[in-house]
Amino acid sequence: EDGGHITAAHVDALVRKHAPMCMRSLHENLRRDKHLKHYGRLQYNLFLKDLGLPIEEALVFWRRAFSNKTDDQFNKEYKYNIRHGYGLEGKRVNYPAKSCVRIITQDQPGPQDNHGCPFRHYSQGNLSAALTAHYGLTPNEQSEILTAVKAQHYHVGCTRLFEITHAKNGVRKGDGLGNGESASHPNRYFERSFELAKD
Ligand code: SF4
């Protein structure tokens, strides 16, 4: 499952185990709605590319995920953008996966959107509900995160979630993603989580 050898079938387990909340939310919404809107697809596609999901597997993944669409709809409406993200269409730019700063500051999500950073863009109620549903955090654990977020320290909230969910791997408060480093890129968050699981 290391870089370049991920298949469409690995995505569910890898994302549920190692992805930061922004990508986990996109994934769960994709599974629930069998669809993601444009900026959500963009954000998640580049994340999966950076994870090492090859384009052939990305097309399998998205085709299966959009199970309500016909092949024709999929090919016409979605395939181009997925390939575009891999630098295979249009100007053929190999776009980098978005950093936290870009996700937090650009392309602000509207009420119907699922992209963005949950720590920045969710209401306190929705953030709390997601922390319970996806991570089983206690009210005590949540209150620390919600306090950081209220003070607009979104990365601190995300980093604290990493510490809490990796306590079983020996991560302690203040360790962050390693050496006290805070979350700055969803793919670095994923990689660090993945490395810890191998120890
Ligand atoms: Fe994702 Fe970064 Fe927000 Fe964490 S701080 S949820 S990694 S965008």
Image: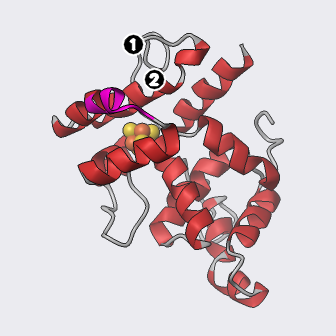
**Which residue sits at x=74%, y=87%?**
70
Q: Is 181 situated left or right of 190 in this image?
A: left
* Magenta highlight: main SS: helix
Give the color scheme: rainbow, by chain, secondary structure or one colour.
secondary structure
Image quadrant, ligand 1: top left
Q: Is residue 47 magenta?
A: no
The percent position of residue 53, horizontal first and vertical second, equals 74, 49
Q: Nearer the viewer, residue 51 or 35?
A: 35
Label 2 element class? helix
Q: Mark 2 packing: few (<14 Cα in 10 Å), some, or many (20+)?
A: some
The percent position of residue 132, horizontal first and vertical second, equals 43, 42
- Give me the disc on residue 164: 2
Among all residues in the image, which is located at the extreme left?
Answer: 151
Question: Range of the magenta residues?
Answer: 137-143
Q: Nearer the viewer, residue 83 or 2?
A: 2
Q: Quadrant of residue 4?
A: top right
In primary-sequence order, the first of circles 2 and 1 is: 2
Ligand 1 within 8 Å of the CB at mark 1: no
Q: Nearer the viewer, residue 98 or 108?
A: 108
Is disc 2 in contact with disc 1, using a CB cutoff of under 8 Å? no
**Which residue sits at x=31%, y=69%?**
110
- Give me the disc on residue 173: 1
Considering only vertical position in the picture, is 109 above or below 121? below
Q: Quadrant of residue 131?
A: top left
Considering only vertical position in the picture, is 89 above or below 198? below
Q: Quadrant of residue 61?
A: bottom right
The percent position of residue 125, horizontal first and vertical second, equals 27, 51
Q: Is 99 situated left or right of 79 in this image?
A: left
Q: Disc 2 residue type? A: Ile
Ligand 1 within 8 Å of the CB at mark 2: no
**Which residue sits at x=82%, y=61%?**
56
**Which residue sits at x=42%, y=48%?**
130
